[in-house]
Every structure is written in C-alpha cells, then in structure tokens.
Image (cartoon, grey):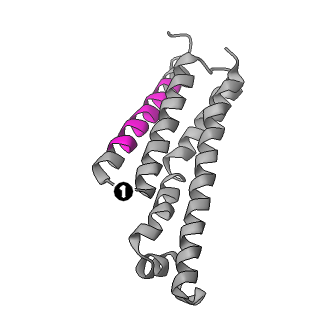
C-alpha cells in the first residue's frame, strides 16, 4: 500500500477546517457589519460569545472543536507515514474519522441538533482512539500480529 494515501484524509480534514474558518468569518463579519457593532465590543472570545447570537457563533464553536481531537489525528497520520505503518485498516479508519468530523461540523453549523452532533462526534472519536490504541499496541508489542 502506498503510505502517502494517509495524507488524503489528513488534508481533507485540513480542508474542512479551512471551510469552517471561512464560514465563521463570513457569518461574524456579516453580523458585525449589519448590526454596526464596534470591534471593541467583540474584541475577545468571551465578548463575542455574549454579544453575538449563538447561531452566528456556531461555526466558531465547530472550529474550536476541529482544533482539539483532530490534533491527535494529524500526529498519528504523521507517525504512521514516518514509520511506514499505513495499511488498509488505518486508511479506512482515517476516512471514517474525517467523515464523522464533516458530519459533526455540518450539523454544528446548520441545525445544531445536539444528539445528532453528539453521535457523529462519538463515532469519529471512538474510531480515532481505536487507531491510536492499535498504533500504540504495535509500539509496545512489536512483532506481534
């Protein structure tokens, strides 16, 4: 298997993060301009959360979430590539993780149905932890299959 394939889901997740970042700025700037808010009134995340309606801030919440567990995913992908341990299991699991994150972010930025969002988060997180535990197993028990 070509180990560089692990970078497809890697960059797909970075692409999702970019899209959510753009959506966040479009929604926030549009709201700030429409409401003629002073930039001083929203110059910290806490002030932004207080003054700007939740539906405008949802992409920001999704972006924050994309900078949490996905960091582990990025490091794991780099580890798998560097050690030559990319296999079909990791590739499929990586795509499942990314798909779950896409679903999670989409729900967060649109309907924000919490139970649906939670399910996508839980499944993708579970997949990530399985990937991590599998990689760690082979580090601690090399030569075992």
Q: Is residue 101 visible?
A: yes
User: In the orientation shown, which residue stands out farthest toward the front?
Assistant: 34
Q: Which residue is mark 1?
A: 112
Q: Nearer the viewer, residue 45 or 36?
A: 36
Q: How many numbered badges does the structure rendering display?
A: 1
Query: Magenta span: helix, strand or loop, mainly?
Result: helix
Q: Which residue is rendered at x = 43% and y = 32% of the image?
A: 127
Bounds of the magenta segment: 119-135
Residue at 71 percent across and 25 percent down: it is 4
The residue drawn where x is 32% and y is 53% is 113
**Residue 51 is a magenta residue:** no
Instruction: Pinpoint residue 23: horizontal percent, then vertical percent.
Output: 57, 61
SS assignment at label 1:
loop
**Residue 3 location, quadrant:** top right
Q: Quadrant of residue 74?
A: top right
Find residue 111 and report its horizontal and vertical position in percent.
37, 56
- Residues 123 and 102: in front is 102
Residue at (70, 18) in percent of width and height:
2
Q: Any magenta on residue 129?
A: yes
The N terminus sits in image quarter: top right
Residue 137 lies, in percent from the top left, at 48, 23
Determine the residue located farthest toward the left in the rendered image: 115
Q: Is residue 122 above or below residue 135?
A: below
User: Residue 122 appears at what percent x and percent y?
Assistant: 36, 41
Q: Is residue 43 visible?
A: no
Given residues 51 and 138, the one toward you in this image is: 51
Crowd band around label 1 with a 10 angstrom C-alpha radius: few (<14), some (14–19), many (20+): some
């Amino acid at each position: 298997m070509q180990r560089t394939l692990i970078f497809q889901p890697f960059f797909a997740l970075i692409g999702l993060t970019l899209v959510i970042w753009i959506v966040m700025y479009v929604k926030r700037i549009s709201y700030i301009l429409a409401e003629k808010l002073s930039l001083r009134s929203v110059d910290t995340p806490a002030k932004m959360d207080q003054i700007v309606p939740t539906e405008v801030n949802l992409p920001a919440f999704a972006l924050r979430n994309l900078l949490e567990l996905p960091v582990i995913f990025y490091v794991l992908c780099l580890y798998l590539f560097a050690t030559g341990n990319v296999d079909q299991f990791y590739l499929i699991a990586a795509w499942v993780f990314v798909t779950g994150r896409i679903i999670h972010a989409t729900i967060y930025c649109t309907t924000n149905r919490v139970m649906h969002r939670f399910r996508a988060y839980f499944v993708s997180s579970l997949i990530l932890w399985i990937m991590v535990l599998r990689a760690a197993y082979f580090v601690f028990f090399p030569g075992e299959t």
